[in-house]
């Protein structure tokens, strides 16, 4: 069977306004989830290298659970499973943000742990020898250096999480992919529409890459 | 006679390894004590105990009237001791994310809540004293090893310590930069700073030290005036060590 297919530019262009309505949702879930994920990552990353096992153990458990299970299962669990527990429906947007937060938080914990552990012990010792407390040494000496090293892997995680939001079409959040599915149901122009959807993701992730590259360059200037 | 640093029967272990054995050492205010010994003899560990970077298992440690208990005991005086004891490390340990000047200003501002303009003026004065005023706004990685170590000395001095510890301050330097660091240390000694110096620079020890201590396998086996220790060592282990290091 010979293909009669021709790319319909008009269909692609026509779909843009409808698809674009999904962008705010994609950005909201990504941004909200990553901000919370970053805070979770700092908390559990630092707990995972604490000298007391009763801090380390819960942190490691959290990290292993959310790194070791698919994010699709996590969001389905939150959206369809948790209502049984809390006794009421969960807003799909909230479920999406929670899934990105918990999932990226586990990966960011590892990024934080690696970043902090990569800083030479002599830095802390120099701080302590100058009279700074452990807390002061950490936040004014170790953390700024560790954070600079964390920027590339954090950027990587942000891009992964942005793309992960596409899975949340299954719980009916009107993000990019969901908008595409709804649109295609009426027009049957799957090729064109998914092509535009892909371009929209690319526009988001490439912009982020550029910002990150700029931050890295600025950070490197002083070290 | 007032002793600013006092160690009595101090013992320290790394696991099962007995690294410091019954160390008795009292340092007078203004005295320069140079500690020599083979690598692994415990000389660095000894001075790292003085500012609590290493805990010790038994004995007694007192710095300027502040007692620091052995491991597991009362560590309340640690903050006070660290304010009075400055330290210079073999690897400099400058803060790479801060400019030279900010390296020096950090501790006075964080620990003593010094005003920024005051800390700034102190930094200027100290940078001039160690001879690198023109590098104030550079980052440590842009400086030579000798310059970095001089910044590290200035950074420690900014806290106005009563005692300075030097842990092999010239061992990581290219030979041509050793002199400039020793010059700064020599000046400091002349001005009356109490110093405990771990070093392999025997010339410096002979010239600047009031007392030389030789450590072997965690024990002080010989101590005395530099000329006596270098020219007429009593212990055969000291003799063997000195003949090895002074041979070339």
Image (cartoon, coloured by chain):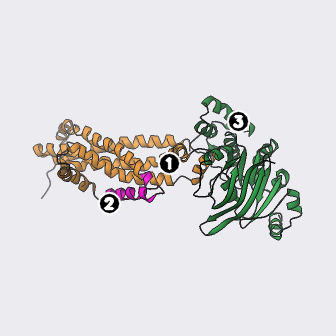
Chain colours: A orange, B green
| Magenta run includes residue B120 | no
Residue furthest to the left: A186
Going from N to C along the chain, the mark reached first, 1 or 2, is: 2
Pointers 1 and 2 in contact (CB under 8 A)? no
- Residue count near mark 2 (Cα–Cα under 10 Å), binned few <14, some 14–19, many ≥20: few
Q: Provide the residue designation for mark 3.
A: B133
Quadrant assignment, res B57: bottom right
User: How many numbered tags mark residues here?
Assistant: 3
Q: Nearer the viewer, mark 1 or mark 3?
A: 1
- Chain letter of disc 1? A
Judge left or right: residue A128 versus residue A215.
Answer: right
- Residue at 29% x, 40% y is A27
- Residue at 36% x, 53% y is A106
Magenta stretch: dominant SS? helix
Q: Provide the residue designation for mark 2.
A: A68
| In front of the other: A94 or A160 | A94
Residues marked 1 and 2, same chain: yes
Mark number displayed over residue B103 = none
Q: Provide the residue designation for mark 1.
A: A146
Q: Residue A7, can we see it?
A: no
- Chain letter of disc 2? A
State the image coordinates of residue A74 (x, y, percent, origin top left): 25, 54
Magenta residues (range): A45-67
């Amino acid at each position: 069977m010979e293909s009669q297919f021709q790319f319909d530019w008009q269909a692609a262009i026509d779909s843009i306004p409808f698809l674009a309505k999904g962008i705010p949702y994609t950005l909201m879930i990504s941004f909200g989830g990553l901000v919370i994920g970053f805070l979770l990552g700092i908390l559990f990353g630092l707990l995972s290298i604490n000298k007391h096992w009763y801090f380390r153990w819960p942190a490691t458990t959290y990290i292993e659970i959310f790194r070791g299970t698919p994010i699709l299962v996590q969001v389905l669990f939150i959206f369809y499973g948790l209502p049984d527990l809390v006794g009421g429906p969960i807003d799909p947007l909230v479920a999406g943000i929670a899934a990105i937060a918990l999932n990226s938080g586990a990966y960011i914990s590892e990024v934080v742990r690696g970043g902090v552990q990569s800083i030479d012990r002599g830095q802390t010792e120099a701080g302590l020898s100058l009279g700074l407390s452990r807390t002061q040494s950490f936040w004014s000496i170790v953390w700024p250096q560790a954070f600079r090293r964390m920027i590339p892997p954090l950027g990587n995680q942000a891009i992964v999480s942005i793309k992960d939001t596409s899975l949340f079409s299954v719980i009916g959040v009107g993000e990019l992919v969901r908008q595409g599915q709804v649109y295609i149901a009426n027009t049957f122009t799957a090729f064109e529409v998914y092509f535009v959807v892909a371009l929209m993701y690319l526009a988001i992730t490439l912009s982020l890459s550029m910002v990150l590259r700029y931050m890295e360059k600025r950070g490197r200037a002083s070290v | 006679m007032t002793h600013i640093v006092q160690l009595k029967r101090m013992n320290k272990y790394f696991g099962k390894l007995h690294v410091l054995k019954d160390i008795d050492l009292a340092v007078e205010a203004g005295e320069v004590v140079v500690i020599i010994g083979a690598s692994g003899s415990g000389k660095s560990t000894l001075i790292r105990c003085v500012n609590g970077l290493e805990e010790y298992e038994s004995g007694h440690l007192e710095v300027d009237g502040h007692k620091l208990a052995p491991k597991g005991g009362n560590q309340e005086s640690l903050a006070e001791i660290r304010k009075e004891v400055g330290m210079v490390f073999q690897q400099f340990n400058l803060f790479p994310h801060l400019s030279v000047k900010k390296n020096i200003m950090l501790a006075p501002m964080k620990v003593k809540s010094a005003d920024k303009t005051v800390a700034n003026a102190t930094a200027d004065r100290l940078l001039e004293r160690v001879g690198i005023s023109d590098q104030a706004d550079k980052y440590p990685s842009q400086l030579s090893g000798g310059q970095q170590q001089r910044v590290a000395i200035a950074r420690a001095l900014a806290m106005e310590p009563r005692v300075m510890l030097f842990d092999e301050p010239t061992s990581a330097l290219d030979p041509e930069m050793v002199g400039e660091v020793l010059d700064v240390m020599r000046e400091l000694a002349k001005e009356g700073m109490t110093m405990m110096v771990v070093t392999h620079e025997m010339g410096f020890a002979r010239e600047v030290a009031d007392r030389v201590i030789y450590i072997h396998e965690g024990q002080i086996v010989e101590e005395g005036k530099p000329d006596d220790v270098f020219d007429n060592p009593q212990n055969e282990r000291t003799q063997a060590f000195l003949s090895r290091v002074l041979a070339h």
